[in-house]
Protein backbone atom coordinates (compact mmCIF):
# COMPACT_ATOMS: atom_id res chain seq x y z
CA UNK A 1 0.00 0.00 0.00
CA UNK A 2 1.51 3.33 -1.05
CA UNK A 3 1.93 5.97 1.69
CA UNK A 4 -0.98 8.38 2.08
CA UNK A 5 -1.77 11.32 4.30
CA UNK A 6 -3.44 10.24 7.54
CA UNK A 7 -5.64 12.83 9.25
CA UNK A 8 -7.12 12.89 12.75
CA UNK A 9 -10.54 14.54 13.19
CA UNK A 10 -11.84 15.18 16.70
CA UNK A 11 -15.32 13.94 17.55
CA UNK A 12 -14.73 13.86 21.29
CA UNK A 13 -17.74 16.04 22.07
CA UNK A 14 -20.11 13.62 20.34
CA UNK A 15 -18.58 10.64 22.09
CA UNK A 16 -18.81 12.42 25.43
CA UNK A 17 -22.34 13.81 25.11
CA UNK A 18 -24.14 10.99 23.30
CA UNK A 19 -27.69 11.30 21.95
CA UNK A 20 -29.45 11.58 25.31
CA UNK A 21 -33.12 10.76 24.82
CA UNK A 22 -32.91 11.28 21.03
CA UNK A 23 -32.81 8.55 18.43
CA UNK A 24 -29.69 8.25 16.30
CA UNK A 25 -31.63 9.80 13.41
CA UNK A 26 -32.71 12.81 15.46
CA UNK A 27 -29.25 13.24 16.96
CA UNK A 28 -27.72 13.26 13.50
CA UNK A 29 -30.35 15.67 12.15
CA UNK A 30 -29.62 18.08 15.01
CA UNK A 31 -25.86 17.96 14.39
CA UNK A 32 -26.34 18.51 10.65
CA UNK A 33 -28.69 21.45 11.20
CA UNK A 34 -26.08 23.11 13.42
CA UNK A 35 -23.33 22.37 10.85
CA UNK A 36 -20.91 21.34 13.57
CA UNK A 37 -17.32 20.32 12.75
CA UNK A 38 -18.07 16.94 14.29
CA UNK A 39 -20.95 16.45 11.83
CA UNK A 40 -18.56 17.21 8.96
CA UNK A 41 -16.08 14.63 10.28
CA UNK A 42 -18.78 11.96 10.63
CA UNK A 43 -20.16 12.72 7.17
CA UNK A 44 -16.71 12.43 5.60
CA UNK A 45 -16.04 9.15 7.41
CA UNK A 46 -19.41 7.75 6.33
CA UNK A 47 -18.78 8.67 2.69
CA UNK A 48 -15.37 6.99 2.81
CA UNK A 49 -16.95 3.85 4.25
CA UNK A 50 -19.56 3.82 1.49
CA UNK A 51 -17.24 4.46 -1.45
CA UNK A 52 -13.59 3.83 -0.55
CA UNK A 53 -11.62 0.63 -0.07
CA UNK A 54 -9.43 2.34 2.56
CA UNK A 55 -10.75 1.67 6.09
CA UNK A 56 -11.60 4.35 8.66
CA UNK A 57 -10.47 4.20 12.31
CA UNK A 58 -13.04 5.08 14.96
CA UNK A 59 -13.45 4.70 18.74
CA UNK A 60 -15.62 2.12 20.45
CA UNK A 61 -16.03 1.62 24.17
CA UNK A 62 -13.50 -1.24 24.07
CA UNK A 63 -10.63 -0.20 21.76
CA UNK A 64 -10.34 1.75 18.49
CA UNK A 65 -11.74 -0.17 15.52
CA UNK A 66 -10.61 -0.18 11.90
CA UNK A 67 -13.90 -0.10 10.02
CA UNK A 68 -14.94 -1.03 6.50
CA UNK A 69 -18.23 -1.81 4.78
CA UNK A 70 -18.77 -5.45 5.73
CA UNK A 71 -20.73 -6.09 2.53
CA UNK A 72 -17.95 -5.18 0.07
CA UNK A 73 -15.02 -7.56 -0.45
CA UNK A 74 -12.62 -4.87 -1.66
CA UNK A 75 -13.36 -2.72 1.40
CA UNK A 76 -12.81 -5.61 3.80
CA UNK A 77 -9.59 -6.56 2.03
CA UNK A 78 -8.48 -2.99 2.78
CA UNK A 79 -8.56 -3.85 6.50
CA UNK A 80 -6.24 -6.79 6.03
CA UNK A 81 -3.89 -4.66 3.92
CA UNK A 82 -3.77 -1.81 6.41
CA UNK A 83 -3.23 -4.07 9.42
CA UNK A 84 -1.00 -6.48 7.51
CA UNK A 85 -3.14 -9.17 9.09
CA UNK A 86 -3.60 -12.79 7.89
CA UNK A 87 -6.90 -13.14 6.06
CA UNK A 88 -7.88 -16.42 7.77
CA UNK A 89 -8.81 -14.53 10.94
CA UNK A 90 -12.56 -13.69 11.06
CA UNK A 91 -13.75 -10.13 11.68
CA UNK A 92 -16.49 -8.90 14.00
CA UNK A 93 -19.42 -7.07 12.40
CA UNK A 94 -20.69 -3.94 14.17
CA UNK A 95 -24.30 -2.83 13.71
CA UNK A 96 -26.19 0.14 15.10
CA UNK A 97 -29.38 -1.72 16.03
CA UNK A 98 -31.25 -5.01 16.10
CA UNK A 99 -33.07 -3.82 12.97
CA UNK A 100 -29.80 -3.67 11.02
CA UNK A 101 -28.91 -7.13 12.32
CA UNK A 102 -32.27 -8.50 11.18
CA UNK A 103 -31.54 -7.19 7.68
CA UNK A 104 -28.29 -9.17 7.69
CA UNK A 105 -30.07 -12.31 8.82
CA UNK A 106 -32.72 -11.94 6.11
CA UNK A 107 -30.81 -10.67 3.07
CA UNK A 108 -33.19 -11.53 0.22
CA UNK A 109 -36.15 -9.20 -0.40
CA UNK A 110 -39.36 -11.14 0.06
CA UNK A 111 -42.50 -10.89 -2.00
CA UNK A 112 -45.69 -11.73 -0.09
CA UNK A 113 -45.83 -15.10 -1.90
CA UNK A 114 -42.21 -15.98 -1.12
CA UNK A 115 -42.59 -14.83 2.46
CA UNK A 116 -45.28 -17.50 2.94
CA UNK A 117 -42.87 -20.22 1.76
CA UNK A 118 -39.64 -19.03 3.39
CA UNK A 119 -39.09 -19.03 7.13
CA UNK A 120 -37.74 -15.74 8.39
CA UNK A 121 -34.37 -16.01 10.13
CA UNK A 122 -34.24 -14.51 13.58
CA UNK A 123 -31.78 -14.28 16.43
CA UNK A 124 -31.70 -17.63 18.28
CA UNK A 125 -33.71 -17.51 21.50
CA UNK A 126 -30.70 -18.34 23.69
CA UNK A 127 -29.19 -14.95 22.85
CA UNK A 128 -32.25 -12.88 23.77
CA UNK A 129 -31.53 -12.54 27.52
CA UNK A 130 -27.86 -11.76 26.78
CA UNK A 131 -28.84 -9.05 24.32
CA UNK A 132 -31.30 -7.53 26.78
CA UNK A 133 -28.62 -7.48 29.47
CA UNK A 134 -25.47 -6.49 27.56
CA UNK A 135 -26.37 -4.70 24.31
CA UNK A 136 -25.32 -2.11 23.41
CA UNK A 137 -22.02 -3.23 24.90
CA UNK A 138 -18.77 -5.19 24.67
CA UNK A 139 -20.35 -8.56 23.85
CA UNK A 140 -20.09 -10.33 20.49
CA UNK A 141 -22.43 -13.20 19.64
CA UNK A 142 -21.90 -15.88 17.00
CA UNK A 143 -24.75 -16.32 14.49
CA UNK A 144 -25.35 -18.56 11.44
CA UNK A 145 -24.41 -16.83 8.21
CA UNK A 146 -27.60 -17.11 6.10
CA UNK A 147 -27.83 -18.32 2.54
CA UNK A 148 -27.30 -15.41 0.16
CA UNK A 149 -25.48 -13.51 2.89
CA UNK A 150 -24.80 -9.82 2.35
CA UNK A 151 -21.48 -10.17 4.14
CA UNK A 152 -18.25 -10.34 2.16
CA UNK A 153 -16.56 -13.74 2.36
CA UNK A 154 -13.49 -12.08 3.89
CA UNK A 155 -15.50 -11.13 6.99
CA UNK A 156 -16.23 -14.71 7.99
CA UNK A 157 -12.92 -16.20 6.74
CA UNK A 158 -15.15 -18.78 5.00
CA UNK A 159 -16.81 -19.94 8.23
CA UNK A 160 -20.54 -20.70 8.32
CA UNK A 161 -21.01 -18.24 11.19
CA UNK A 162 -20.27 -14.57 11.84
CA UNK A 163 -19.68 -12.55 14.99
CA UNK A 164 -21.71 -9.38 15.59
CA UNK A 165 -22.27 -6.78 18.28
CA UNK A 166 -23.94 -3.42 18.92
CA UNK A 167 -21.24 -1.17 20.43
CA UNK A 168 -22.01 0.88 23.53
CA UNK A 169 -20.06 3.84 22.13
CA UNK A 170 -22.64 6.39 20.92
CA UNK A 171 -20.11 7.70 18.41
CA UNK A 172 -19.61 4.23 16.90
CA UNK A 173 -23.37 3.69 16.56
CA UNK A 174 -23.82 7.12 15.00
CA UNK A 175 -21.11 6.43 12.42
CA UNK A 176 -22.72 3.09 11.50
CA UNK A 177 -26.13 4.78 11.29
CA UNK A 178 -24.92 7.58 8.99
CA UNK A 179 -22.93 5.18 6.78
CA UNK A 180 -25.97 2.87 6.75
CA UNK A 181 -23.60 -0.08 6.49
CA UNK A 182 -22.67 -2.89 8.89
CA UNK A 183 -19.00 -2.35 9.66
CA UNK A 184 -16.37 -5.04 9.89
CA UNK A 185 -14.02 -3.61 12.50
CA UNK A 186 -11.07 -5.36 14.16
CA UNK A 187 -8.80 -3.34 16.44
CA UNK A 188 -7.09 -0.46 14.61
CA UNK A 189 -3.51 -1.54 15.23
CA UNK A 190 -0.80 -3.14 13.15
CA UNK A 191 -1.23 -6.91 13.36
CA UNK A 192 0.21 -8.49 16.58
CA UNK A 193 0.77 -5.09 18.26
CA UNK A 194 -1.02 -3.93 21.44
CA UNK A 195 -4.56 -2.80 20.73
CA UNK A 196 -5.11 0.97 20.48
CA UNK A 197 -7.08 2.79 23.16
CA UNK A 198 -6.35 6.30 21.84
CA UNK A 199 -6.28 7.95 18.42
CA UNK A 200 -2.54 8.55 18.88
CA UNK A 201 -1.98 4.79 19.12
CA UNK A 202 -3.77 4.28 15.80
CA UNK A 203 -1.73 7.02 14.14
CA UNK A 204 1.51 5.49 15.40
CA UNK A 205 0.69 2.10 13.85
CA UNK A 206 -1.24 2.99 10.70
CA UNK A 207 0.09 6.38 9.61
CA UNK A 208 0.37 6.34 5.82
CA UNK A 209 -1.89 3.28 5.47
CA UNK A 210 -5.30 4.89 6.14
CA UNK A 211 -6.78 8.33 5.46
CA UNK A 212 -8.93 9.17 8.47
CA UNK A 213 -8.97 8.58 12.23
CA UNK A 214 -11.95 9.77 14.25
CA UNK A 215 -10.63 10.87 17.64
CA UNK A 216 -13.15 10.18 20.38
CA UNK A 217 -10.68 10.29 23.28
CA UNK A 218 -9.57 7.39 25.43
CA UNK A 219 -11.58 4.15 25.35
CA UNK A 220 -13.38 3.32 28.57
CA UNK A 221 -13.07 -0.49 28.71
CA UNK A 222 -9.59 -1.03 27.28
CA UNK A 223 -9.88 -4.67 26.17
CA UNK A 224 -11.87 -6.07 23.27
CA UNK A 225 -15.37 -7.52 23.45
CA UNK A 226 -16.20 -10.90 24.91
CA UNK A 227 -17.12 -13.42 22.18
CA UNK A 228 -19.73 -16.10 22.96
CA UNK A 229 -21.11 -19.04 21.01
CA UNK A 230 -24.70 -19.91 21.86
CA UNK A 231 -24.98 -22.24 18.86
CA UNK A 232 -22.98 -24.93 20.66
CA UNK A 233 -24.29 -27.07 23.50
CA UNK A 234 -23.34 -26.10 26.14
CA UNK A 235 -22.74 -22.48 25.10
CA UNK A 236 -19.16 -21.29 25.16
CA UNK A 237 -16.98 -18.22 25.68
CA UNK A 238 -14.56 -18.06 22.73
CA UNK A 239 -12.73 -14.94 23.87
CA UNK A 240 -12.77 -13.18 27.26
CA UNK A 241 -13.31 -9.45 27.16
CA UNK A 242 -15.36 -6.52 28.38
CA UNK A 243 -18.17 -8.69 29.80
CA UNK A 244 -17.10 -11.07 32.56
CA UNK A 245 -17.75 -14.81 32.44
CA UNK A 246 -19.48 -14.76 35.82
CA UNK A 247 -21.76 -12.00 34.56
CA UNK A 248 -22.70 -14.21 31.62
CA UNK A 249 -23.34 -17.19 33.92
CA UNK A 250 -25.88 -15.07 35.81
CA UNK A 251 -28.05 -14.84 32.67
CA UNK A 252 -30.83 -17.45 32.22
CA UNK A 253 -29.75 -20.22 29.85
CA UNK A 254 -26.06 -19.44 30.28
CA UNK A 255 -25.48 -20.91 33.74
CA UNK A 256 -23.31 -23.71 32.32
CA UNK A 257 -21.37 -21.67 29.78
CA UNK A 258 -17.96 -23.25 29.09
CA UNK A 259 -14.57 -21.65 28.53
CA UNK A 260 -13.50 -22.56 24.98
CA UNK A 261 -10.42 -20.41 24.56
CA UNK A 262 -6.79 -20.89 25.46
CA UNK A 263 -4.32 -18.19 26.40
CA UNK A 264 -1.73 -19.44 23.93
CA UNK A 265 -2.39 -19.70 20.19
CA UNK A 266 -4.04 -22.34 18.03
CA UNK A 267 -2.10 -24.77 15.92
CA UNK A 268 -1.38 -23.18 12.55
CA UNK A 269 -3.69 -25.70 10.81
CA UNK A 270 -6.69 -24.99 13.04
CA UNK A 271 -9.45 -22.65 11.91
CA UNK A 272 -10.22 -19.92 14.48
CA UNK A 273 -13.90 -19.61 15.45
CA UNK A 274 -13.39 -16.05 16.66
CA UNK A 275 -10.82 -13.25 16.41
CA UNK A 276 -7.76 -13.47 18.65
CA UNK A 277 -7.65 -17.27 18.87
CA UNK A 278 -4.97 -18.20 16.33
CA UNK A 279 -2.05 -15.79 16.22
CA UNK A 280 0.14 -14.09 18.80
CA UNK A 281 -1.42 -10.76 19.69
CA UNK A 282 -0.97 -7.65 21.79
CA UNK A 283 2.85 -7.81 21.66
CA UNK A 284 5.08 -4.77 22.11
CA UNK A 285 8.54 -4.68 20.56
CA UNK A 286 10.17 -5.29 23.93
CA UNK A 287 10.33 -8.76 25.47
CA UNK A 288 7.52 -9.23 28.01
CA UNK A 289 7.99 -11.22 31.21
CA UNK A 290 4.71 -11.88 32.99
CA UNK A 291 4.70 -12.73 36.71
CA UNK A 292 1.66 -14.45 38.16
CA UNK A 293 -0.41 -12.64 40.78
CA UNK A 294 1.12 -13.02 44.22
CA UNK A 295 4.68 -13.42 42.98
CA UNK A 296 6.97 -12.37 45.84
CA UNK A 297 8.56 -8.97 45.32
CA UNK A 298 12.00 -10.00 46.56
CA UNK A 299 12.22 -12.87 44.07
CA UNK A 300 10.94 -10.65 41.27
CA UNK A 301 13.64 -8.12 42.16
CA UNK A 302 16.32 -10.83 42.09
CA UNK A 303 15.13 -11.99 38.67
CA UNK A 304 15.23 -8.45 37.28
CA UNK A 305 18.61 -7.71 38.88
CA UNK A 306 20.06 -10.84 37.28
CA UNK A 307 18.88 -9.61 33.88
CA UNK A 308 20.38 -6.18 34.50
CA UNK A 309 23.75 -7.56 35.61
CA UNK A 310 24.07 -10.24 32.94
CA UNK A 311 26.03 -8.63 30.09
CA UNK A 312 25.12 -11.55 27.81
CA UNK A 313 21.43 -10.64 28.12
CA UNK A 314 22.12 -7.03 27.14
CA UNK A 315 19.40 -5.33 29.16
CA UNK A 316 20.05 -1.58 29.38
CA UNK A 317 16.59 -0.17 30.09
CA UNK A 318 13.61 -1.89 31.69
CA UNK A 319 9.93 -1.23 32.14
CA UNK A 320 7.83 -2.35 35.10
CA UNK A 321 4.02 -2.46 34.86
CA UNK A 322 2.47 -2.83 38.31
CA UNK A 323 -1.06 -3.72 39.37
CA UNK A 324 -2.03 -4.53 42.95
CA UNK A 325 0.87 -5.63 45.15
CA UNK A 326 4.26 -4.54 43.85
CA UNK A 327 5.74 -1.33 45.22
CA UNK A 328 7.61 1.14 43.05
CA UNK A 329 11.25 0.11 42.74
CA UNK A 330 10.58 -3.49 43.90
CA UNK A 331 13.41 -3.10 46.41
CA UNK A 332 15.93 -2.74 43.59
CA UNK A 333 16.44 0.81 44.80
CA UNK A 334 15.23 2.66 47.88
CA UNK A 335 12.42 5.19 47.64
CA UNK A 336 14.88 7.84 48.80
CA UNK A 337 17.21 7.09 45.89
CA UNK A 338 14.29 6.88 43.49
CA UNK A 339 13.32 10.42 44.42
CA UNK A 340 16.82 11.68 43.60
CA UNK A 341 16.55 10.62 39.95
CA UNK A 342 12.76 10.52 39.52
CA UNK A 343 11.37 12.10 36.35
CA UNK A 344 7.70 12.08 35.29
CA UNK A 345 7.26 11.01 31.65
CA UNK A 346 4.56 12.73 29.54
CA UNK A 347 2.49 9.86 28.18
CA UNK A 348 -1.01 8.57 27.52
CA UNK A 349 -0.21 5.96 30.18
CA UNK A 350 -1.03 7.09 33.70
CA UNK A 351 1.70 7.69 36.28
CA UNK A 352 4.62 6.82 34.00
CA UNK A 353 7.92 7.74 35.67
CA UNK A 354 11.59 6.99 35.13
CA UNK A 355 14.43 6.58 37.61
CA UNK A 356 17.95 5.14 37.82
CA UNK A 357 18.86 1.72 39.22
CA UNK A 358 22.41 1.08 40.50
CA UNK A 359 23.83 -2.16 39.09
CA UNK A 360 27.09 -4.01 39.61
CA UNK A 361 29.17 -4.32 36.44
CA UNK A 362 30.79 -7.66 37.19
CA UNK A 363 33.13 -7.48 34.18
CA UNK A 364 34.68 -4.14 35.11
CA UNK A 365 33.97 -4.59 38.84
CA UNK A 366 32.28 -1.24 39.31
CA UNK A 367 28.82 0.20 39.92
CA UNK A 368 26.89 1.62 36.98
CA UNK A 369 23.34 2.89 36.57
CA UNK A 370 20.63 1.65 34.27
CA UNK A 371 17.27 3.23 33.55
CA UNK A 372 13.92 1.91 34.75
CA UNK A 373 10.45 3.10 33.77
CA UNK A 374 7.52 2.40 36.05
CA UNK A 375 3.78 2.48 35.37
CA UNK A 376 1.13 1.67 37.98
CA UNK A 377 -2.23 0.63 36.55
CA UNK A 378 -4.09 0.90 39.86
CA UNK A 379 -5.75 -1.82 41.88
CA UNK A 380 -9.23 -1.98 40.32
CA UNK A 381 -9.77 -4.35 37.41
CA UNK A 382 -11.42 -1.54 35.46
CA UNK A 383 -8.36 0.72 35.69
CA UNK A 384 -6.00 -2.21 34.96
CA UNK A 385 -7.91 -3.19 31.82
CA UNK A 386 -8.29 0.41 30.69
CA UNK A 387 -4.58 1.19 31.06
CA UNK A 388 -2.95 -2.09 29.99
CA UNK A 389 -2.39 -1.48 26.28
CA UNK A 390 -1.37 2.15 26.86
CA UNK A 391 1.26 1.00 29.36
CA UNK A 392 2.73 -1.57 26.95
CA UNK A 393 2.85 1.02 24.20
CA UNK A 394 4.42 3.62 26.49
CA UNK A 395 7.24 1.21 27.37
CA UNK A 396 7.90 0.68 23.68
CA UNK A 397 8.12 4.45 23.23
CA UNK A 398 10.79 4.50 25.94
CA UNK A 399 12.60 1.79 23.94
CA UNK A 400 13.04 -0.51 26.94
CA UNK A 401 14.56 -3.92 26.38
CA UNK A 402 12.26 -5.88 28.72
CA UNK A 403 8.86 -5.19 30.32
CA UNK A 404 8.16 -6.97 33.61
CA UNK A 405 4.43 -7.17 34.32
CA UNK A 406 2.63 -7.96 37.58
CA UNK A 407 -0.27 -10.22 36.63
CA UNK A 408 -3.65 -10.49 38.32
CA UNK A 409 -5.58 -13.55 39.42
CA UNK A 410 -7.66 -14.69 36.47
CA UNK A 411 -10.01 -16.53 38.82
CA UNK A 412 -11.55 -13.23 39.90
CA UNK A 413 -13.95 -13.18 36.96
CA UNK A 414 -15.10 -9.94 35.36
CA UNK A 415 -12.20 -8.40 33.43
CA UNK A 416 -9.43 -10.38 35.11
CA UNK A 417 -9.56 -13.32 32.71
CA UNK A 418 -9.50 -10.94 29.74
CA UNK A 419 -6.50 -9.05 31.10
CA UNK A 420 -4.49 -12.22 31.71
CA UNK A 421 -5.51 -13.64 28.31
CA UNK A 422 -4.07 -10.54 26.61
CA UNK A 423 -0.93 -10.57 28.76
CA UNK A 424 -0.24 -14.25 28.10
CA UNK A 425 -0.53 -13.65 24.38
CA UNK A 426 1.91 -10.73 24.68
CA UNK A 427 4.41 -12.44 26.97
CA UNK A 428 7.40 -14.45 25.89
CA UNK A 429 7.84 -15.74 29.44
CA UNK A 430 5.41 -16.40 32.31
CA UNK A 431 6.79 -16.99 35.79
CA UNK A 432 5.51 -17.89 39.24
CA UNK A 433 7.96 -16.98 42.00
Image (cartoon, rainbow, N blue to C red):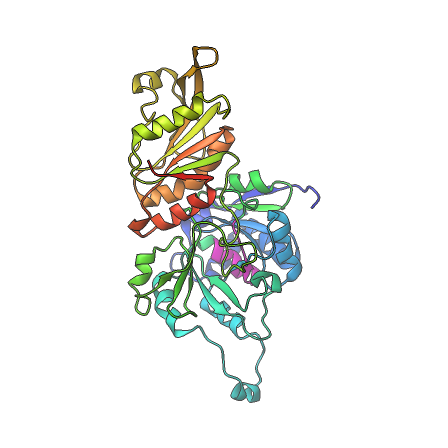
The image position of residue 203, as x and y in percent, is 56, 40
The image position of residue 172, as x and y in percent, is 48, 54
Q: With 398 as the anchor, is 247 left or right in this view?
A: left
User: Between residues 361 and 98, which one lies in front from this camera angle?
Assistant: 361
Q: Quadrant of residue 178?
A: bottom right
Q: Quadrant of the C terminus?
A: top left
Residue at 49% x, 51% y: name it: 265
Judge whether residue 173 is colored magenta.
yes
- Above or below, 308 relative to 386: above
Number of marks in the rendered image: 0
Is any atom of residue 265 visible in this view?
A: yes
The image position of residue 28, as x and y in percent, is 50, 58
Q: Which residues are magenta?
A: 172-187
Is any atom of residue 353 visible in this view?
A: no
Residue at 39% x, 53% y: name it: 242
Q: With 135 as the anchor, is 75 left or right in this view?
A: right
Residue at 34% x, 45% y: name it: 382
The single residue placed furthest to the right in the displayed view is: 2
Judge whether residue 84 is colored magenta.
no
The image position of residue 103, as x and y in percent, is 52, 72
- Above or below, 30 relative to 320: below
User: Between residues 73 and 260, which one lies in front from this camera angle?
Assistant: 260
Q: Quadrant of residue 206?
A: top right
User: Between residues 46 and 264, which one lies in front from this camera angle?
Assistant: 264
Amino acid sequence: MSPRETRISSVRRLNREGPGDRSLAQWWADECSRKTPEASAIEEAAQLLQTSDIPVAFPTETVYGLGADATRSAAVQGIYKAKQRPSDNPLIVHVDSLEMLERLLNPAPMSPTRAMKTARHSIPAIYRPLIERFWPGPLTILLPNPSGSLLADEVTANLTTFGVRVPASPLARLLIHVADRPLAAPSANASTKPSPTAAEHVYHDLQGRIELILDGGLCGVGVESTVVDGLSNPPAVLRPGGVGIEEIRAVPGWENVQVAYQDGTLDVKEIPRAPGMKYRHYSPKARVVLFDAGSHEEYVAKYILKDLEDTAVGVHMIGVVRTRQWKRGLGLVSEENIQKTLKPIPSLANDLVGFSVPVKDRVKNREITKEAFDCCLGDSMESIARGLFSALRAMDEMEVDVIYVEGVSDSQGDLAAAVMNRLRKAAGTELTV
